[in-house]
Each structure stands twice: as C-alpha cells, then as structure tokens.
Image: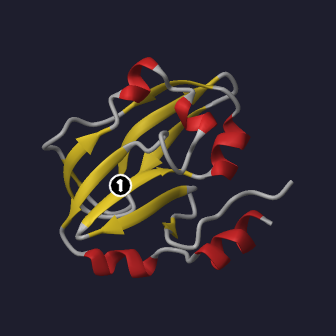
Amino acid sequence: MTFDVPEDRRYLESHEWAHETNGVVRVGITEFAQDELGDVVFVELPDEGDSVTQEAEFGVIESIKAVSDLYAPAGGEIVSVNEALFDSPELVNDDPFGEGWMLEIDADDTDELEALLSAEEYEDQIA
C-alpha cells in the first residue's frame, strides 16, 4: 500500500507531521500512523496555553488496537486544539492531513523543524 506523504511538511520518526505557517506549526499524525492504529476512538490533547518541548509527549491517541503517545514536532505554546476530535476522533482516520489535525503550536524556534524528517526521508522510513 502506498501512503500519502505531503511534501510541504516535516515528520517525526514517531509519525507526527508538522506544517508551519508564519511561525505557527499545525500538528497531526500521518496517514501511515492512522492506518497502523486502525479505528481511532479517543484523542487526549493538551489545553490551549500549555507549553510543549520539541519531541516531548503532548497527548495520547487510542484506537481499537492500541494506545499511543503523541510527540510534539516543535516547542512553544499551544494556541489551538482541534476540539472536533473530542466528539469525532474518526476524523484522524478520515482526513489525517486535513480535518484530523490535532493542535497548533506558536513555535519558539521554527528552525527546530529542520531537524525533522523530510517527506522523502519519512517515505524511506515507512517503506
């Protein structure tokens, strides 16, 4: 199976993606990750205003098959949380790069994203 890996994002080895716009980093999990998890039934996310550190745990995703920790691709302040996931966690399965996004971070340093995997490097990892 071939998975969508958008070129305009950076990736953690733990399968989170990061898309930066004007210093704000939108975060979610990849199509590969949601496929491995199966049907997502619950997502636990931090509160707006909380701070995260790059590669530190920020939440939990639970599926019918597994419970997995979620890791931040950048450090900074949480400025937005996708509250739609609380009532409809299946959005992560339906549209992991769109409506299934998880949070947005006002990044302390967007240069941190350079340490993450490129789309090509991530594709190599999941191949």
Choose between 20 and 55: the one closer to the eye: 20
Q: Amino acid at mark 1?
A: Ala
Using residue 64 as the reference point, say whether residue 26 is left or right of it: left
In the displayed structure, 104 sits above or below 67; it is below
Choose between 10 and 67: the one closer to the eye: 10
Q: Quadrant of the N terminus?
A: bottom right
In the displayed structure, 48 sits above or below 124; it is above
Using residue 11 as the reference point, say whether residue 23 is left or right of it: left
Residue 105, position in %: x, y?
A: 26, 55
Residue at left 62%, top 35%?
Answer: 94
Residue closest to the far left: 49
Using residue 61 as the reference point, say whether residue 52 is left or right of it: left
Choose between 110 and 6: the one closer to the eye: 6
Residue 65, position in %: x, y?
A: 70, 27
Q: Quadrant of the C terminus?
A: bottom right
Residue 113, position in %: x, y?
A: 38, 75
Residue at left 28%, top 75%?
Answer: 110
Q: Secondary structure at mark 1?
A: loop
Residue at left 33%, top 76%?
Answer: 112
Which residue in the structure is indicated by mark 1? 56
